[in-house]
Amino acid sequence: MTTAAPAGVWADVVGQPDVVAELQAAVAQPAAMTHAWLFTGPPGSGRSVAARAFAAALQCPAGGDGTCHECRTVLAGTHADVHLVVPEGLSIGVDEVRQIVRTAGRAPSQGRWQIIVIEDADRMGERAFNAVLKMLEEPPPRTVILLCAPSLHPDDMPVTIRSRCRVVALRTPSVDAVAEVLVRRDGIDPALAAWSAAAAGGHVGRARHLARDESARLARKSVLDIPLSLVSLAACLNAADDLVAAAKEESDRTAAAVDAVETEAVKTSLGVGARGPGVAAAGRGAGALKELEKRQKSRATRLGRDSLDRALVDLAALYRDALVISSSGGATDLPLAHPDRRADAAELARRIGAEGALRRIDAVLAARTALERAVKPQIAIEALTVALRLPS
């Protein structure tokens, strides 16, 4: 039986009926509201989407109808009493968090609540976590803090933070649920929506990207072509070069589109190019432009690492499929992460076996860890592709 799609602000919270029910119950009982919430779930499960929908429902007089001014402005990111912290660089700094703490202490100016949404809260450093902890220990009466993180693991969220929050655990949505929302919300052809949802492994944002962008589909194909191509040392090094170059190209393209607009806006506000009194203001704004360039460089680095990480996740999933096939005893109805590459997974299973697949999954995970620890991408990816080399 197909579950009806949620309505109003909840329409884009895909495949999470229990979560929607829990949040709707909290909205309906403001006297029992918790001041701090922690949304957890794997990448693509919709943590930040659920948090934003919850924020809109809390501000909406009708509990999240999706049509009123409050709902529209919250979802658009322009509501005066809903503040979004979305890390553009590699981390969320303590200064940014302290500014948010000051904002959290204010009474709401228009809405029913003062709401702080921190996406990717696991990217906060120790000092930033300590600033948030103080806010959670002494919460203002009309303030709600919504944190989003991948898991409850101490590497993602300190025990002192999560113990003061009500945890909302999201799961990876089903392929059918993702395909349905692509058709309903984005107007994607049903066949392409079904393929994209399956290829993305339940990651809603990735599925939408694959469905709408042919270059994304070609990039995925290039990544999944790699394992069977690694027949020599030269092939391994060439594959590493291609992976790193593709990630840089994608990050440069994405960053350039945003950087140009930001830089022009700052220059205009500083009077760069102006004559008369504006010249002095432009001179004083050199520091602001340098700070902007620093943030943009950090964002480009993060975009490049995120692009590489997506490629590594795809590779690990293909080796996982090879492991499943190798261990299945010939079963043909196996649930695979890349069902469209079943033949490649079967060939890998034949050539490297279950043990070889496990070793290669470990190698991919080690490469992800190396990138997180700021090892240069070229070095980390070359070491990986050499470890993935096929036996003679």
Image (spheres, helix red, strand yellow):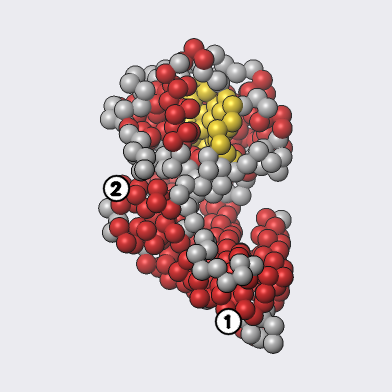
Q: Which mark is residue 281?
A: none
Who is closer to the viewer here, 385 or 127?
A: 385
Q: Residue at x 50, y 71 (%)?
A: 342
Q: Which mark is residue 184?
A: 2
Left/right of residue 133 with respect to residue 221 in the rendered view = right
Label 1 belongs to which residue?
Answer: 229
Q: Look at label 1 and name its amino acid.
A: Ser
- Is the residue under label 2 in contact with that under label 1 (CB below 8 Å)? no
Query: Image quarter for residue 9?
Result: top left
Cα distance between the residues tagged 1 and 2 = 39 Å
Density class for disc 1 (Cα within 10 Å; few <14, some 14-19, many ≥20) is few
Who is closer to the viewer here, 301 or 155?
A: 155
Query: Image quarter for residue 325?
Result: bottom right
Q: Look at label 2 and name its amino acid.
A: Arg
Q: Secondary structure at mark 2?
A: helix
Q: Earlier in the sequence, mark 1 or mark 2?
A: 2
Q: Residue at x 45, y 56 (%)?
A: 206
Q: Residue at x 63, y 85 (%)?
A: 231
- Image: 212 above or below 379: above
Q: Secondary structure at mark 1?
A: helix
Residue 283, position in %: x, y?
50, 46
- Image: 235 above or below 358: below
